[in-house]
Amino acid sequence: MHRTVIKRGNLPDIPSPCTGVCSMDMSNEYCVGCFRTRLEIGGWIHLSNEEKLAIIKTLRARRKAHQD
């Protein structure tokens, strides 16, 4: 049986968390759709997958804080 080994460096890019609701909430400086800052949005295509995953973890915390 032949098994395919996938190397981490060969993984496809992590897609943008954009939800299509693109509007900045100036009170907290996050997009109301995806909860990213302007810098995170603008720099997304230049980030490594590790950096993107770190931002996604941060977005979860921001979204949760916003809901509370």
Image: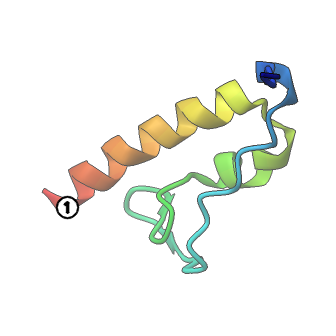
Above or below: residue 52 compared with residue 35: above
Residue projecting furthest to the left: 68
**Percent x, y of residue 42:** 77, 53
How is the structure coloured here?
A: rainbow
Percent of width and height locating residue 64: 25, 51
Left or right: where does residue 65 sit relative to residue 24?
A: left
> What secondary structure is marked by label 1?
helix
Q: Quadrant of residue 50?
A: top right
Tell me the quarter of the picture where residue 49 sits: top right
Residue under the image location 71 percent in, 45 percent down: 14
Q: Is residue 43 left or right of residue 62?
A: right
Query: As shown in the figure, which amino acid type bears the numbered disc 1?
Result: Gln
In the picture, residue 28 is in which quadrant?
Answer: bottom left
- Give the residue drawn at x 65%, y 37%: 52
Residue 53's place in the image compared with 29, above or below, is above
Image height of 11 relative to 16, above or below: above
Task: Give the quadrant of the N terminus.
Answer: top right
10 Å crowding of disc 1: few (<14), some (14-19), many (20+): few
Which one is in front, 27 or 1?
1
Residue at the disc numbered 1 = 67
Quadrant into which the C terminus falls: bottom left
Image-based side of 65 in relation to 40, left or right? left
Q: Residue at x 54, y 80 (%)?
A: 21
Left or right of residue 21: residue 12: right
